[in-house]
Image (spheres, rainbow, N blue to C red):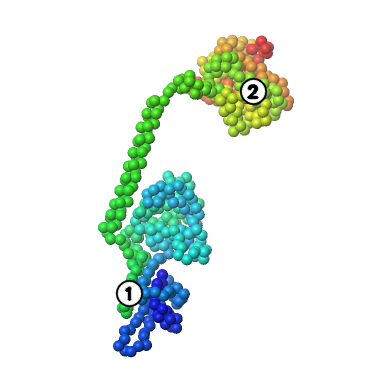
Amino acid sequence: FYPKRLTNENNRTMQKQPAMVLPGAVQMRIKSSQSSTGERLSQTKSMVLPEPDTLQKPVSMSFLNSGRLNIFVFVYCLQTILKGEYLNKAKIAEGGKKLRKNWTSTWVVLCSNQLFFYKESKQEAVANLKPGGKPDGVDLYGAVIEWTTEKSSRKNVIQITTSNGHEFLLQADHFPTISKWHDAIKKAVDSLSSGAGGQSCGRVAPHRSNSIELLSRPTCEPTKPKPKETKSEHRRSIMFKLNYSASDSADKNGVKNRLKKFISRRPSMKTLQEKGLIKDRVFGCHMLTLCERERTTVPKFVKLCVEEVEKRGLEADGLYRVSGNLAIIQKLRFLVDQEEALDLGDSQWEDIHVITGALKMFFRELPEPLFPFRFFDLFVEAIKIKEPTQKVQALKKLIHQLPKSNHNTMKLLFHHLRRVLVKSKKNLMSTQGISIVFGPTLMWPEFESGNMEVNMVYQNQMVESILIECVEIFGPEGM
């Protein structure tokens, strides 16, 4: 309750007489004048509603201030439905205007017609609340509560939309907790909307009295807006939402139209490349195209990687089998695609597995593998030959039919892998280990029509056979 002004004369009299408390009724304070019988009897009254199951204590005189004779009595009756509990709260709209979502931990209290948000627990909030300060409140009359998964990536989120366009999100880590609050708030909203909240106390309009008329105890009925005002408010809310969604849809259509115009007018990739605005990549570029651009028969990046590995990494444990740091590998790839000056001896490429990982990625991302698609079935038929000499001759014949860039790159790579095998006691890499790594990296069918496991066996056998007969097939190194 909010005590209001009394006269100085009434204050002095009431300090002498203790307040009288009537259980279950309003308090009355009466002062009779000492003047003659004909004089007017002056009485003042104040109304205090005691809390259920508790005795009402006398009102302290420190709350009463001197003023006019007129008395304003305000009664604000609230029945607590759910006591305070910490929930995560975010306000996402105010009056229909979208706000930036900002989650905060809030002490929430549910009453019959309002939801209160405290910065801390109720006891601490009351103790620290400054005079005149109030917690944030949400009027539940005409509100809508629903579960939502679109407004937040968090789990267990409910959305409360008020009749004046405010939108709140409440979230708890445990589903039973937020489900309890959802059901309680929905029940309170339904009670207010259907008029079943007769026992819930609403706002009582200020009562003004300056006579000796006795004040009867007001019934605890919620003051509802007039039907016409309710309908008009509801209509304004619906119209606002319709206008907002219509403008939002128009904006989306406008963006789509501008994107279509931009896409239709943008220059082709070939035009941008001719103007030098877009440079050709190294990773993902066709082998023949890359070699023609670099005016060589072996990509420069492949040569750099092979030279650096042979310089300082042939004895590294698990060479080509152990994976390097993918983030650093992607950084190296970016620099190569930008055609920036590259020094693989720099300290940032200290891990040799980063260089070997980038080399394997280069071969895996070729649009067409090092063993071209049109040769896949021919190589599979050659590897099926059981007689060793005929098998080697068939492989040699096919390899010499490959494009020059594929042939020379393959020759450089397999001679390099032979030198890796020479250090097998240090790097623990065998012929089978290398073939398992490079089989699917250098050779795969254009269409996966057959059995993948069978194709993988042929891929591994192909690399292993070429690796063993490297000198016979490609000739001595340097020739």
Helix, strand, or loop for circle 2?
Answer: helix
Give x and y (percent) for residue 367: 52, 21
Q: State the image quarter where residue 403 is shown.
A: top right
Residue at the disc numbered 1: 209
Where 206 sits versus 403, above or below? below
Number of marks in the rendered image: 2
Horizontal side of residue 15 vs 331, given as left or right = left
Residue at image location 32% in from the left, 45% down from the top: 243
The amino acid at mark 1 is: Ser
Give x and y (percent) for residue 339: 57, 23
Helix, strand, or loop for circle 1?
Answer: strand
Q: Is 175 or 10 nearer to us in this picture?
A: 10
Q: Is 396 or 307 nearer to us in this picture?
A: 307
Residue at image location 52% in from the left, 64% down from the top: 128
Give x and y (percent) for residue 448: 50, 23
Q: Quadrant of the C terminus?
A: top right
Where 276 sits versus 184, above or below? above
Which dot, 1 or 2, sits closer to the camera? 1
Residue at the disc numbered 2: 305
Question: Residue most toward the bottom?
Answer: 36
Measured in 3D between alpha carbons, the distance from the residue under mark 1 to the one under mark 2, in whole angstroms, is: 96 Å
Horizontal side of residue 398 vs 32, given as left or right = right
Residue 52 visible in image: no
Residue 300 visible in image: yes
Q: Quadrant of the N terminus?
A: bottom left
Residue at image location 39% in from the left, 62% down from the top: 112
Residue at image location 53% in from the left, 25% down from the top: 452
Q: Is 393 or 46 nearer to us in this picture?
A: 46
